[in-house]
Amino acid sequence: MIQDKIQILAEDIGNGITDVGACLGTAPTQERLEQLEGLILNNRLQYVPVGLALEEINKKGLYKKHAETFEDYMEQRFGLTAREGYYLISSARTAVAVDDYGDIDDDPLKIIANFGSHGKPIILDNEKKARALAGLNNCDKKQAATDAYQKALVEKRTLTARDIEVEASKYKKPKIDKTPDIEKERFSLEKELGKVNGIFIKIAEKYPSCKDKQDFFAEYIIHIEDMLKYLKDNKDK
C-alpha cells in the first residue's frame, strides 16, 4: 500500500512536524518544504493532506532541490511511484470537492489542524472510496457520494467503495464513437482482408502437397467459389 511505503520511510528518517498549529503561518520555501515533507511522513494514513502536500510541492517546484523531476522526487524521498503519487493527489482533490473540511484554503496543514472540528461526517474516509468517483465532474462526484452515503445510512450499514462506485456509474455518460466514417470503412476492409488471409492459410494447410503457385491458387479459387455458392444457397434460410 502507498501508506505503508511512507510509514517505513518515516520510521527511517524520523523527520516531521510536531506542532501543526505553529506551522500555519507564512514560511520561506525551504521551511515550507520541510513542513510538507514532515506532514507526508507523519500522517501517512491520511491520504487527503498527503495528496494536497504532494500537489503543492509539485506546483511550486519545491522538489527541485532534491530531484530534476517531481516523479524522481517522489520515488527518492517517499518510495512512491509516479502512478501512486498522482493517485494520491487526484484522490485528495476528489475528497476536498466532496467532503466539507472547513476553511482550509487547500492547505494540507490546516486539514490536519482542523480535522473533525467542524462536526460534519467525512464520506470519503479512505482513498479507495475517492477513487470510485474517478471520471466524474465535481458536482456529480459530490452527488454520487452523498447518494451512496444516504443509502447506506438508511440501510444501517457501513458505506463501502463499491456502494459509491454503483452510484457513480449512474452519472457516467456512455462513450460516443467519434471515429470518422473513412476510418470505420478502412477498419471494415482490414477485417475482411484478415478473414480472407485466414482462409488462405487454411487452404495452404489443407493442401500441403501443392508444389507450385498455380495449383495452390486454383484450389484457393475453387474454395472461394464453394463459399459463395454456400452463402447464396443459405441466404434466405
Image (tube, grey):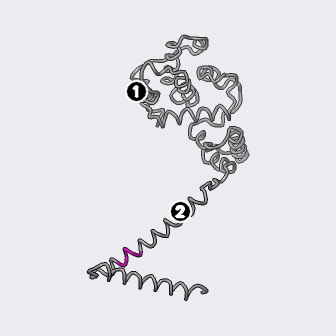
Circle 1 residue: 76
Residue 21, given in percent of the width and then of the height, sits at 60, 14
Residue density around tag 1, few if under 14, some if 14–19, many if 20 or more, within 10 Å = few
| The C terminus sits in image quarter | bottom right
Judge whether 58 appears above or below 194 on screen: above
Name the residue at the front extreme.
214
Task: Identify which amino acid the numbered label 2 is placed on.
Answer: Arg
Judge whether 121 appears above or below 117 on screen: below
Residue density around tag 2, few if under 14, some if 14–19, many if 20 or more, within 10 Å = few
Horizontal side of 156 relative to 186 (left or right) equals right
Q: Nearer the viewer, mark 1 or mark 2?
A: 2
Q: Is 218 one of the magenta-colored residues?
A: no
Residue 213, given in percent of the width and then of the height, sits at 31, 78
Near-viewer residue (14 or 229): 229
| Image marks 1 and 2: residues in contact by CB distance under 8 Å | no
Task: Identify which amino acid the numbered label 1 is placed on.
Answer: Gln
**Residue at 71% in and 30% down:** 120
- Which stretch did the figure color magenta? 199-203
Q: Residue 194's quadrant in the figure? A: bottom left
Circle 2 residue: 186
Dominant SS of magenta comes to helix
